[in-house]
Image: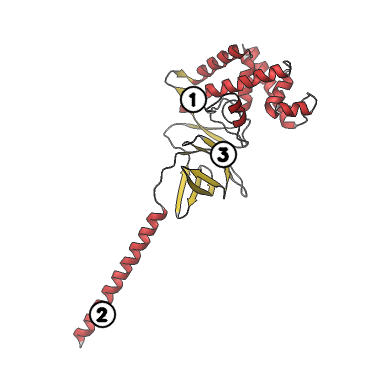
């Protein structure tokens, strides 16, 4: 009788142990599925902090597309549809079915500096290694590009430099909440109109911006105030107000700011 009871208990515990191991195996497999490792070539360009409506500007390096996303927005990558689940500083979570992916800011072992560019609504992180190339100093290269484009299109290099300073503070990867991109903050439509394929290529962006300035100079008869107002608010807006600086505080401040930089650069020589 005791042998039968012992055998029954042994079978009972063995069965429960097997059942639990099956449950654990199932949970482990399910967890592995939820956190399946997927590498998305996606770059966080900027985040806009807000307790109620945080936003993130993502660059899809697969297509080159740059767009601003809020929580709940759809993000398409290589024909796969993800939903933006969470946004915080330097971290975005994307979800597709049971698949959840976290995209973080690129981390390197180099020095970083937090700066504020005039056309951005939040702080951005700039890696200073991006400002140098094998051929020399970034600043010297940009100055050469500015002078070359100035001669090519007949635009004062000091004016070009002043617009870049006001628009992006010489950040080739700057993106505004309105999706203006690169050093001269070209919106996608303007970039396309002036032949810019990669707005984050400093040389292409500067050339596109200088072409736009040349067009505005010709259109407004060389009136610097109107040229700058049109660069900021659009030529149609300037025309709407009878070829005067529009009564927008942002545009009025922008014109004064660029002219201030222009005078500084000219006096500096």
Residue 182: x and y, percent? 56, 28
Q: Label 3 to label 2, Cα distance in Å?
A: 64 Å
Query: Does the rendering let one see residue 2?
Result: yes
- Residue 188 drawn above or below residue 225: below
> Which type of secondary structure does the marked residue at label 3 adopt?
strand
Q: Which residue is the site of mark 1?
A: 131
Residue 121: x and y, percent? 62, 36
Foreground label between 3 and 2: 3
Residue 118: x and y, percent? 63, 30
State left or right for residue 181 relative to residue 95. right
Give the quadrant of residue 255.
Answer: top right
- Seen at 61% across and 46% down, the residue is 50
Task: Report the front residue among 58 and 80.
Answer: 80
First along the sequence among labels 1 and 2:
2
- Residue 76 drawn above or below residue 184: below
- Seen at 68% across and 28% down, the residue is 232
- Residue 139 drawn above or below residue 52: above
> Which type of secondary structure does the marked residue at label 1 adopt?
helix
Q: Residue 67 shows which numbered tag?
A: 3
Q: Quadrant of the C terminus?
A: top right
Q: Quadrant of the N terminus?
A: bottom left
State left or right for residue 217 relative to residue 106. right
Residue 168: x and y, percent? 59, 28
Task: Report the front residue among 97 and 94.
Answer: 97
Q: Which residue is the site of mark 2?
A: 9
First along the sequence among labels 1 and 3:
3
Foreground label between 1 and 3: 3
State left or right for residue 155 relative to residue 58. right
Query: Looking at this rendering, what residue extends furthest in the right direction?
Result: 242
């Amino acid at each position: 009788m005791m042998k039968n009871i012992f055998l029954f208990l042994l079978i009972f515990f063995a069965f429960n142990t097997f059942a639990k191991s099956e449950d654990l195996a199932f949970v482990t497999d399910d967890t592995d599925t939820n956190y399946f490792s997927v590498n998305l070539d996606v770059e966080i360009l900027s985040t806009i902090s807000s307790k109620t409506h945080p936003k993130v500007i993502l660059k899809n390096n697969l297509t080159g597309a740059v767009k601003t996303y809020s929580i709940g927005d759809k993000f398409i990558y290589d024909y796969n549809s993800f939903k933006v689940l969470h946004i915080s500083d330097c971290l975005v979570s994307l979800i597709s079915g049971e698949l959840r992916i976290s995209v973080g800011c690129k981390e390197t072992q180099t020095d970083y500096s937090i700066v504020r560019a005039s056309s951005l609504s939040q702080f951005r992180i700039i890696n200073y290694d991006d400002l140098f190339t094998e051929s020399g100093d970034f600043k010297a290269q940009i100055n050469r590009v500015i002078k070359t484009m100035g001669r090519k299109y007949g635009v004062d290099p000091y004016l070009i430099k002043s617009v870049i300073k006001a628009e992006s503070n010489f950040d080739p990867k700057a993106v505004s909440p309105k999706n203006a991109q690169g050093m001269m903050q070209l919106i996608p439509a303007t970039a396309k109109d002036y032949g810019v394929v990669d707005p984050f290529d400093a040389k292409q962006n500067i050339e596109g911006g200088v072409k736009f300035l040349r067009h505005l100079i010709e259109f407004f008869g060389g009136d610097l105030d109107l040229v700058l107002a049109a660069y900021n608010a659009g030529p149609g807006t300037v025309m709407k107000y009878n070829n005067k600086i529009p009564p927008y505080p942002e545009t009025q401040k922008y014109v004064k700011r660029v002219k201030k930089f222009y005078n500084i650069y000219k006096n500096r020589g």
